[in-house]
Image: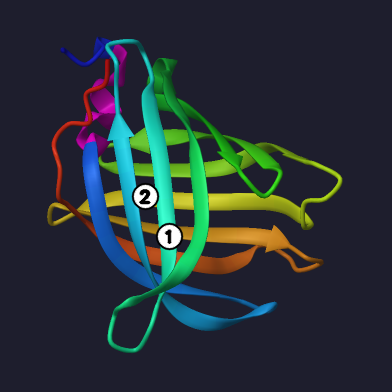
Amino acid sequence: MDVHPDLEPIAFLLGRWEGAGVIGYPTMESANFGQEIVFGHNGKPFLTYESRTWLLDAEGSKVRPLSTETGFWRMQPERQIEVCLAHPTGIVEIYVGEVVFHKIELHTDVVARTTTAKEYNAGHRLYGLVNGNLMYAYDMAAMGHPLQSHASAELKRVGDSGEQN
């Protein structure tokens, strides 16, 4: 199935990516984590997105699941982008941003939380393709703290274009 022409600026994301990174925040100790991200498509003008992370021990083995998020990435005119993400912890985010070559910069436009969700107020994400690998950094404002670094990772493409029916 062909990718919708509107998705050309972000088609480089398609596929399954795996790798590792570092997380930390004032409310937690720094740690290493593993991650899998899958970007797919069904021929319509959006990418599907799913991310899973897990805590890694000193040897790089999986210890326990960390976070999951799922959503949709939609290109807009003039290389603008909208990303809708949902988390099983009761948080929904809408990001807006811009695609410049193989770099995507996003910031939250809307954050909604259920009454039982932890306090989370804003996010900033930067994705880029560097030497064929997907690099990203994620800053957040949560639990009374201002926007600051939370996670970064380097992922390698390990799967196909993520085509879905």
Residue 113, image x, y percentages:
77, 42
Q: Specify whether residue 78 is painted magenta.
A: no
Which residue position holds label 2?
A: 127
Q: Nearer the viewer, mark 1 or mark 2?
A: 1
| Label pair 1/2, CB-CB below 8 angstroms | no
Task: Say above or below: 127 vs 38.
Answer: below
Q: Of 103 and 48, which appears nearest the observer?
A: 48
Q: Considering the image in quadrants, where does the N terminus appear?
A: top left
Per the rendered image, the range of residues in magenta is 6-14
Task: Say above or below: 108 vs 155.
Answer: above
Residue at the extreme right: 115
Q: Secondary structure at mark 1?
A: strand
Which residue position holds label 1?
A: 53
Q: Main secondary structure of the magenta part?
A: helix
Residue 156, image x, y percentages:
18, 56
Q: Of 24 and 42, which appears nearest the observer?
A: 42
Residue for point 37% across, 34% down:
99
Q: Categorize mark 2 by other alpha carbons within 10 Å: few (<14), some (14-19), many (20+).
A: many
Q: Is residue 101 left or right of residue 142?
A: left
Q: Secondary structure at mark 2?
A: strand
